Amino acid sequence: MSLLIAGAFFVFMSYVEVAGTSHLATPLSSIAAPLNVLAKVYGVSWFRVPVSLCAMISFFSLTLSCLNSGSRIIYPMAHHRVFHSHLSRTHHLNRTPHVAISIYMAIIVTVPLILEAFTNPLTIFGDAGTLAAFGFLLAYFMITIAAPVYLKRIGELRASHVVMAVAACVLLLVPTIGSFVPVPPYPVRVFPYVFLAYMLVGSAWLYVAAKRKRESSPRSARTWKRPSRRRCYVGTHRRSARGRARNRRGITLEFGEFGDVQGRQYGVTTNRLCGW
C-alpha cells in the first residue's frame, strides 16, 4: 500500500509540473527548481519558502538513509575481506559500525565538494541521481528474475507470479530504454557506460577478494567433510562434571574444544546434518 501511495503521489506531482510549465518559454527539463518557479509564476511567491524548507528536510533524510545503508554495506564487505578489516570494527559501547560510518560520511562530503569546483549543486544532485538509477534498475531486474526462480525451487510458483514478473520486467524496460533513446546530452549519455565499467571493476574485485580468502583459509576449512553416521548422536545430552556429554547410545563426546554452549550447538548441527 505504501508503494501505491508513493507512486500515485509522484505521478500526480509530475503531472502538476508538466502541466504548470507547459506554457513557459523554458522547458521543464531546464528548470532547476520547478516548484519554486511555479509558485512565482502563479502569484504565490511566499510558497517558495516552505517548499524549499521541505526540500532541505527531504535531502537531509535522504542523506541519512544513504549513510545508514552505505555504511551497513561496507561493514559486512569488510568482514568478507572485500575492504580492509578495520572497516568491520564496531563501537565498544554502541555496537555500531562507527569506522564504516565515519569513512562513508567523509566520502559523501568530499565528493560533492570536489565536484562543486566544476559545476553547481543542483547539477551534481541530478547527475548523481541519474547514475544511481542504473544501480536500482539492475537490482530490480535481478529481484524480478530471482523471485519466480526461488518460488519454483520451493514448489510454490504459480502462473500469476510469472505474469507479475514478466509485467515488472516490461515496465523496467521503459526507463532502461529511455536512458539510451533518444540520446541524452553529455555527460548523461555516458553514464550507462560508466556504470557498466563500475560493475566490471567491482566484479573483478569481488573475484580477487574471494580467491584471496579461499587461499588464506585454513586447510581444514577447505577440506571439511560431512560427519560419518557413527559420529552422529541423537537424544538429550547429559553434561558431566568432566566436560563430557553422553547420548542414549552411550557414546561419549568431548566438548573441550568448543565449550559448553557451543558444544551443544555443534551437536545439534551434526545431528541435523546426519539426518537422525
Image (cartoon, grey):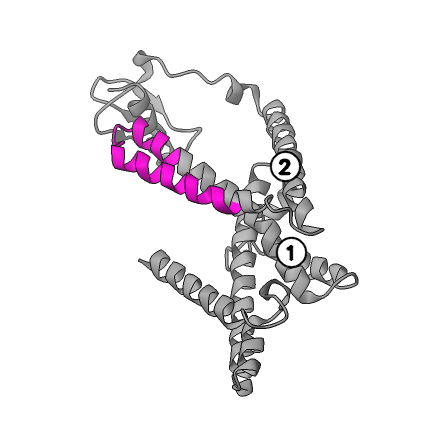
Q: Is residue 227 above or below residue 196?
A: above
User: What secondary structure is marked by label 1?
Assistant: helix
How many numbered circles are shown? 2
Tag 1–tag 2 contact (CB < 8 Å): no
Closer to the chain start, of discs 1 and 2, is: 1
Query: What amino acid is at disc 2?
Result: Gly
Please state which of residues 240 and 47 is positioned toward the viewer in this rendering: 47
Residue 26 quadrant? bottom right
Cα–Cα span, label 1 and label 2:
21 Å
Tell me what residue is drawn at x 71 percent, y 57 percent.
111
Decide whether residue 155 is among the magenta residues: yes
Tell me what residue is drawn at x 53 percent, y 63 percent.
62
**Residue 96 appears at what percent x and percent y?**
52, 56
In the rendered image, which residue does mark 1 sit on? Answer: 127
User: What secondary structure is marked by label 2?
Assistant: helix
**Residue 264 appears at what percent x and percent y?**
33, 32
Magenta stretch, overall SS: helix
**Residue 41 appears at what percent x and percent y?**
56, 81
**Residue 139 appears at what percent x and percent y?**
49, 42
Query: What amino acid is at disc 1?
Result: Asp
Q: Is residue 110 above or below residue 243?
A: below
- Asked whether, in this view, residue 99 is left or right of residue 264, the answer is right
Picture quarter with the N terminus: bottom left
